């Protein structure tokens, strides 16, 4: 958990020794409660974003409390009632929330057993729990959580003195559990925020400017369909109607009647590396480490120097962002699929000039979320429109063009690496220079709001330039920029751009997408230059990280490394990384077929996430991350001209389709005795890197530009 | 204008303005949640419905195109109490992550199995090609469709 960066401490947040998010919110009743009718209500601060976290948290609670899983109800987070667990991001939910739930439940169980034992006149240790009922020696009934639900036992702060169940005794955590949310989604029942239908609800749509820099000069008069009405604040232009079709039709008409004065503000799409060299930037050292050179220092025998670059990327969720807001008196209620309800509330309060205590943000599920998308932005859109119609809930849903074109984007970047091995083929020196925009524009962390519409109001708010968290907090651009390999001389610097033509923020993996690929490519090149097998070369430098070596060996064994190409144009690459240097380990081997375009045919993945609470959920996340990374590696780049994002439709921002999805074989190295680590992001970097290595094996060229399209590969060859 | 058609086997009639899409009609006056908006450009499959048994996107189709026809959505496939073999198979394979794409994918898969009871993997991929899944659960979905097909051929639950 990160206390230094963006993690709000709760009122009791003075308990540094407590595990996970109990540090921020030690009061047990904020995490769980029992009901007299036999239900456990769990109230975590982390949110379901399609990753299955609520199912895993329920498993952990059922385990520690010894209750049947069907008794668990996991409530979506809401400001005021849920612990403030910051943002659901960084593959940290199991580490932060899961560990808190585990310890809170262990303490809750102990408190309940102590009371029951006292009443039964037996020592606590003589009681056992069977599906929430307490049984004494000989099976005599001694109460239950449900009978003691009203005793107020959980109105205390955690003490951190009750050991959770040891790994060997776990019965539920560590087994495949079906997702709690999946049935609703398979039977078409209302489950998503988008399905919320409140009495008197109005539908809003926003009309975005045609350029990133634009001033609204006029609006031609004309009728709007149905009961649609216009809303305008500065250059924030929107419509409201009682039916969705009318709101959409009205927005289209209004867009055609708005007169904008536009100006160029975006860099040349084809010259991003040059733009990043020229843009004002804040330079800092990520790491600088020199071991004293010995007298027998053999010096560099082979050197590799290369620059790698990546484009801006879109989140490209299949659903579009949506929010519902309602003003009642001087209070605002917002339903949002934000990753951080408290963070969103903080920025809403700034823009609306409202005391945060008057705002309630309730989480409701949205379509797949892979980082900081437009969920927070659309919540402000809805709140602005709701303020104009007090008493009416207002639902705003984004168009596909807004989703792809106006959500925060994952920033373009470059990394230049120069590295050397000695005559013995051991790494001597490593120099990296990173350039790019920061990877976080999340709300709730700065004096100015980061929400999209805020910059278009009258008066406008300044948009803060994206930042990068410090490395101990996971980093941003520099995430995974420090190689996990032993090297005596290491220097990594970063240059965070101080201008932000496209609002940039966190997308699954952040800097790891570029950094892991670049590092693994250089490792392949050094191995080749020094005549070593790339797997053996890596293993020589992973002696201090046996779990990295283990996943690499496993992936190599799965794909029968070294693989000799069976036919022309076929190649296999392999890569490994420990996510963030502190998270899960993942190795990936990829087989590609390079014809007119590159197609990834197969992936072999080995991962170590420590204890896997729900191994099937972990497998789903790791494979899903690898398939998303395949899409990023082979297809994705945000298109734009000097005025606006032009890649705002599926035709202009294509992602992987069914026919292009590789077969995946996946193995988890089971370590139930080790701490659980997040599974959402570790596979992305190694997958991009393995595909790049496979392209080299197939074509003999080293990719230097993402995505690995025929155009970019041709440029690399030139 | 007044619009009447058959929705999941039952007759319905609504007032449908000219600019209303079939998806807006299904989610608006008809109150369904299964068909979902994804792009409005027939490019992602989230809004897939059947029109006289054939799968097609509903997001850009004028509602009036459904007049007098049979419209099917995921709500018509099965219920938790009486699931379609596809729904059983998707749960068995845990074939999904965020779930946004699922109702459209089930509609296309059901249309496939209705015309081709024994598809191979390539046929399943081809039938699902109009659908996007950003979470990367495609391999699980393909396995689930093949599992459901086998179950339906054997006349048992998946």
Image (cartoon, coloured by chain):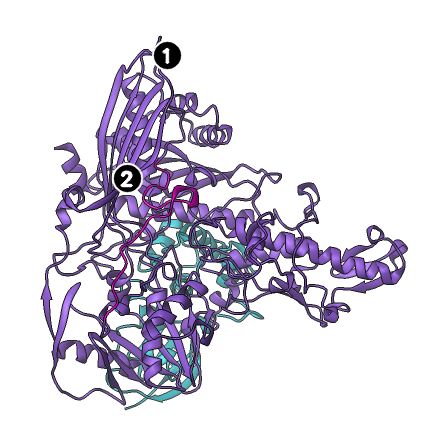
Chain colours: A purple, B cyan
Callout 1: helix, strand or loop? loop
Question: Which residue: 39% across, 77% down?
Answer: A325
Q: Which residues are magenta?
A: A460-481
Which residue does the numbered mark 1 point to in the structure image?
A294
Q: Is residue A533 above or below residue A701?
A: above
Question: Which residue: 31% across, 53% down?
Answer: A657
Residue closest to the eye, A359 or B8 = A359
Q: Which mark is residue A443?
A: none
Question: Is any atom of residue B48 visible in this view?
Answer: no
Lower position in the chain sequence, tag 2 or tag 1 = 1
Q: Which mark is residue A494?
A: 2
| Distance Cα–Cα, label 2 vs label 1 | 29 Å
Secondary structure that dominates the magenta span: loop
Q: Residues within 10 Å of mark 1 (few under 14, many from 20)?
A: few
x, y percent for residue A433: 26, 35
Q: Chain of mark 1?
A: A
Q: Dividing the picture into quarters, in which one does residue A376 lie?
A: bottom left
Q: Dividing the picture into quarters, in which one does residue A415 lie?
A: top left
């Amino acid at each position: 958990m990160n206390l230094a960066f963006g993690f709000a401490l709760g009122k009791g947040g003075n308990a540094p020794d407590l595990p996970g998010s109990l540090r921020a919110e030690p009061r047990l009743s904020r995490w769980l409660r029992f009901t007299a009718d036999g239900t456990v209500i769990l109230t975590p601060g982390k949110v379901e974003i399609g990753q299955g976290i609520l199912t895993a948290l329920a498993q952990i609670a059922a385990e520690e409390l010894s209750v049947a899983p069907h008794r668990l109800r996991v409530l979506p987070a809401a400001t005021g009632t849920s612990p403030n667990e910051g943002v659901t991001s960084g593959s940290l939910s199991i580490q932060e929330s899961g560990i808190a739930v585990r310890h809170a439940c262990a303490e809750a169980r102990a408190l309940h057993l102590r009371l029951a034992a006292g009443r039964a006149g037996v020592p606590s240790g003589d009681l056992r729990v069977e599906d929430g009922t307490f049984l004494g020696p000989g099976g005599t009934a001694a109460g239950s959580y449900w009978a003691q639900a009203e005793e107020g036992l959980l109105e205390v702060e955690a003490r951190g003195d009750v050991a959770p169940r040891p790994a060997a005794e776990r019965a539920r955590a560590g087994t495949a559990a079906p997702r709690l949310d999946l049935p609703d989604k398979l039977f078409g029942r209302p489950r998503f925020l988008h399905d919320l239908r409140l009495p008197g609800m109005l539908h809003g749509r926003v009309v975005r400017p045609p350029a990133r820099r634009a001033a609204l000069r006029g609006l031609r008069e004309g009728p709007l369909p149905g009961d649609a009405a216009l809303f305008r604040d500065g250059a924030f232009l929107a419509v409201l109607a009682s039916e969705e079709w009318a709101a959409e039709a009205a927005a289209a008409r209004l867009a055609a009647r708005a007169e904008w004065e536009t100006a160029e503000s975006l860099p040349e799409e084809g010259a991003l590396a040059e733009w990043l060299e020229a843009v004002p930037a804040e330079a800092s050292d990520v790491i600088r480490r020199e071991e004293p050179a010995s007298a027998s220092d053999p010096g560099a025998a082979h050197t590799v120097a290369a620059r790698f670059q990546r484009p801006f990327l879109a989140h490209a969720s299949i659903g579009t962002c949506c929010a519902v807001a309602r003003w009642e008196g001087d209070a605002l209620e917002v339903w949002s699929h934000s990753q951080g309800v408290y963070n969103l509330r903080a920025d809403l309060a700034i823009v609306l000039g409202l005391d945060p205590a008057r705002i309630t943000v309730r989480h409701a599920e949205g379509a797949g979320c892979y980082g900081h998308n437009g969920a927070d932005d659309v919540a402000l859109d809805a709140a602005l429109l709701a303020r104009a119609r007090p008493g009416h809930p207002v639902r705003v849903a984004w168009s596909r063009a807004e989703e792809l074109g106006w959500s925060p984007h994952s920033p373009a970047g470059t990394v230049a690496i120069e590295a050397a091995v000695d005559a013995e083929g051991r790494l001597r020196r490593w120099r990296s220079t990173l350039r790019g925009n920061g990877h976080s524009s999340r709300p709730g962390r700065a004096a100015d709001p980061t929400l999209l519409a805020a910059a278009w109001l009258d008066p406008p708010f300044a948009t803060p330039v994206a930042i990068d968290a410090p490395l101990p907090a996971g980093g941003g651009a520099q995430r995974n920029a420090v190689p996990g390999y032993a090297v005596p001389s290491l220097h990594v610097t970063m240059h965070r751009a101080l201008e932000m033509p496209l609002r940039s923020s966190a997308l699954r993996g952040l800097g790891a997408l570029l950094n892991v690929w670049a590092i693994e490519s250089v490792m392949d090149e050094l191995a080749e230059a020094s005549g070593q097998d790339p797997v053996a070369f890596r293993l020589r430098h992973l002696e201090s990280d046996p779990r990295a070596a283990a996943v690499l060996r496993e992936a190599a064994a799965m794909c029968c490394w070294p693989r000799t190409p069976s036919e022309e144009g076929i190649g296999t690459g392999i890569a490994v990384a420990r996510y963030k240097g502190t998270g899960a380990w993942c190795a990936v081997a990829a087989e590609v077929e390079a014809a007119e375009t590159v197609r990834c045919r197969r992936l072999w993945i080995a991962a170590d996430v420590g204890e896997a609470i729900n191994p099937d959920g972990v497998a789903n996340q790791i494979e899903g991350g690898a398939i998303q990374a395949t899409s990023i590696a082979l297809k994705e780049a945000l298109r734009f001209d000097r005025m606006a994002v032009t890649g705002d439709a599926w035709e202009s921002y294509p992602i992987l389709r069914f026919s292009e999805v590789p077969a995946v074989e996946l193995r988890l190295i089971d370590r139930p005795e080790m701490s659980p680590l997040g599974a959402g992001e570790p596979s992305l970097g190694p997958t991009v890197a393995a595909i790049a290595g496979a392209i080299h094996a197939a074509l003999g060229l080293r990719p230097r530009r993402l995505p690995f399209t025929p155009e970019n590969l041709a440029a690399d060859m030139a | 204008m007044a619009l009447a058609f058959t929705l999941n086997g039952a007759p319905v009639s609504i007032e449908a303005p000219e600019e209303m899409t079939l998806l807006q009609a299904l989610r608006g006056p008809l109150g369904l949640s299964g068909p979902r908006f994804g792009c409005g450009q027939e490019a992602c499959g989230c809004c897939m419905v059947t029109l006289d048994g054939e799968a097609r996107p509903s997001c850009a189709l004028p509602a009036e195109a459904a007049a007098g026809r049979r419209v099917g959505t995921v709500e018509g496939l099965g219920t938790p109490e009486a699931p379609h073999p596809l729904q059983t198979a998707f749960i068995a394979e845990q074939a999904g992550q965020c779930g946004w794409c699922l109702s459209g994918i089930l509609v296309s898969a059901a249309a496939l199995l209705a015309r081709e009871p024994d598809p191979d993997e390539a046929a399943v991929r081809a039938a699902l090609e109009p659908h996007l899944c950003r979470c990367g659960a495609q391999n699980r979905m393909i396995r689930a469709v093949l599992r459901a097909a086998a179950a339906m051929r054997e006349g048992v639950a998946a």
